[in-house]
Amino acid sequence: MWVIEFFHVIIGILWIGLLYFFNLVQVQSMPKMVEEGAAKQYTQIILPRALFLFRHAALWTVITGIAYYMAGRGTVQGIPSGEIMIGMLLGIIMAGNVWFIIWPNQKKIIAGELEGDALAKAKRMAFLASRTNAWLSIPMLIGMIAANHGGIMF
């Protein structure tokens, strides 16, 4: 059981780390990269790999989280609890944002399929979903931690 928890935590750290990288580093750096002519290389070399790891870390964090929850019911302190359920729900919403909003829009942006208003709309949608995930990550992490550390609900 500890193996599932270990992978859930490690993969979750990768996912949230990339989420914060995209929101705190990439968003602020892109205008300067465009200005200096480095954006094309970044979007063709680094971004596809980072997005691959990002979306698969989201998927495997959810899968290992559900596996850990199912294996730990009745044997692990804090499972089930209201906090863990809130954390799980927020994690599933965040993974849905990654796979169904961020990735489809980023795929079109990277491929150069869009121009003008359609490009601006795709960038905005991906940005808003990513920023939403960044804000949801805080209560999600609190819920996950609180479930095994005395709770916050009662």
Image (cartoon, rainbow, N blue to C red):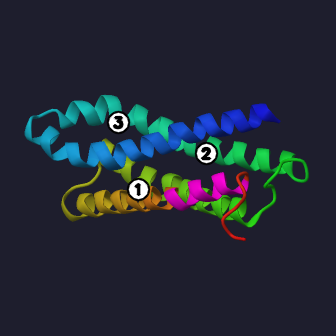
Q: Residue at x 46, y 58 (%)?
A: 133
**Between 30 and 116, the one nearer to me in the picture:** 30
Circle 1 sits on which residue?
130
Disc 2 vs disc 3: Cβ atoms closer than 8 Å? no
Q: Main secondary structure of the magenta part?
A: helix
Residue at 21% across, 35% down = 40
Instruction: Name the residue carrying label 3.
Output: 47
Evaluate whether residue 112 shows in this view: no
SS at mark 3?
A: helix
Instruction: Determine whether the residue tagged by mark 1 lies in a helix, strand or loop.
Output: helix
Q: Residues within 10 Å of mark 2 (few under 14, many from 20)?
A: many
Q: Which residue is mark 2?
A: 59
Q: Is residue 143 magenta?
A: yes
Q: CA distance from mark 1 to mark 3?
A: 15 Å
- Lower position in the chain sequence, tag 2 or tag 1: 2
Q: Amino acid at mark 2?
A: Leu
Furthest residue in direction right, as rendered: 74
- Residue that extends furthest to the bottom in the rendered view of this protein: 154
**Quadrant where the N terminus lies?**
top right
Above or below residue 58? Residue 3 is above
Q: Is residue 130 above or below residue 4?
A: below
43 relative position to 52: left or right: left
Q: Secondary structure at mark 2?
A: helix
Q: Which residues are magenta?
A: 138-147
**Callout in the foreground (1, 3):** 1
| Quarter of the rendering occupied by the C terminus | bottom right
What x and y, as percent, mark residue 107? Answer: 39, 46
**Can you give x and y, in whole percent of width and height, for residue 2 in the image?**
78, 34
